[in-house]
Amino acid sequence: MSKSNKNPHKRMKFDTQGLNLFSIHPLERFNGPCSTYKQPVEIMSFSYDNERTLHMDDRELKYYYPPDLKDCNLSLGYETFVQREHSGPEPIHSLLDALAYSQKRSADKNLIKTDLISWRGIFTKILCTPYNRNEPWELGATLWNNTIFIEEHETEYTKEHSTGSTPRQKLMGYWGYKFENLSTISKLPSEITSLDDPELINRKNTIVNTNVQYCSVAKTSLGNNKLIMGAEVDCICDVKPKRPENPVEKYIELKTSKVIEKEKDNFNFERYKLLKFWAQSFLIGVPKVIVGFRDNEGRVTNVQEFKTMEIPKIVKGKNGMWNATVCLNFANKFFEWLRTVIVIDDPNSSYSISFHSPFKDIKVEFIGKKDSVLAERHLESLKST
């Protein structure tokens, strides 16, 4: 796989313990012409069923159908909520299984040659880091065959924020899943001929089960950094096109947010929510985000559509907001730098990548021959890459 030997970034430094450090400040150095981001192209997709069994097909892909706002109670069915056994960060193993499956069946032997492979959520964290300087994270990375494989480590912070630390937080976490449940159906919207259709009636009573997921795997590049990422996709607006047409252009991201009542609500929505909504959708190439605005009781009062490419314009020039160009340039420089400090090509070794208080630097440390991101089966199934 391609790997540059050049060091395009000069702001590498070392702390007293010999850790490689990437400075966040000053952000001004990430201004200027925006790094080129190539339109992501889906190379495969896969599904998890309600028993968390992996299937290399689209069986769990859902279609968007607007929720019934006359009765859109996001707390409905909370008592039957089924959460997958491991609710922390998703290991990279299933993504690599899917890539190995795809490579084996592809005539293109370079299908999954790339510089970095990870879940979309990890790339989102990095893209948002210049403006999310109060959210700690830890990643593990293994370099093998000139590709850096990255997955997230579970920490006390992620444990608390993945499921919530109070009953109220747990319920609010459920609301997002229920909104997806109330906004999707299992058959084409064009096949719905009546509001009495069982698909529309039954979705209110369908048990929310977070074992179930549909995931897209896309290939793209940021600057000179080639990326492959896996991402959970909420739904699609129409029939999924077959390749070479690119299905990511029909995907939809579903989100919930508090009803905007005050100036502070609007600031928080634009500063924090829209940043994440944009980053998640932009990275995988999803063209629009549909947001259900809910009250404090979890009832959706209105739904609004945001075009992903238009979101940065909403916050442009406003005080205290974020800049999409800075995010992309930051991520581009960080990836370039990362490829110069993760240099031990060994499937049994790993590096730690972390961002903690006081949130001034991203730290990279070689851990040694332990905690490899890769499973033994991947060494055989992906060795041709």
Image (cartoon, rainbow, N blue to C red):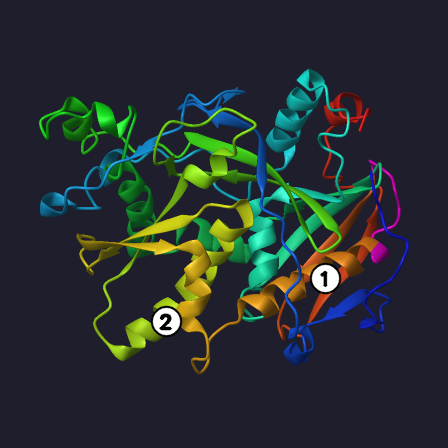
Q: Estimate the spatial distance between the alpha carbons at disc 1 and disc 2, rounded to whole Å.
A: 27 Å
Q: Give SS at disc 2.
A: helix
Which residue: 71% across, 29% down? Answer: 111
Badge 1 amino acid: Phe
Q: Position of residue 280 (x, y in %)?
A: 49, 52
Q: Give the residue pinned by disc 2.
A: 268
Q: Position of residue 72 (x, y in %)?
A: 16, 45
| Residue that label 1 marks | 334
Whether residue 99 is in magenta: the answer is no
Quadrant (top left/top right/bottom left/bottom right) for the N terminus: top right
Query: How many marks do you count on the picture?
Result: 2
| Residue type beneath disc 2 | Asn
Residue 256's x, y, as percent?
31, 53
Q: Earlier in the sequence, mark 1 or mark 2?
A: 2
Range shown magenta: 340-348
Residue 155 in sight in this render: no
Looking at this rendering, what residue extends furthest in the bottom direction? 319
Residue closer to the observer: 361 or 12? 12
Q: Is 19 situated above or below 99?
A: below
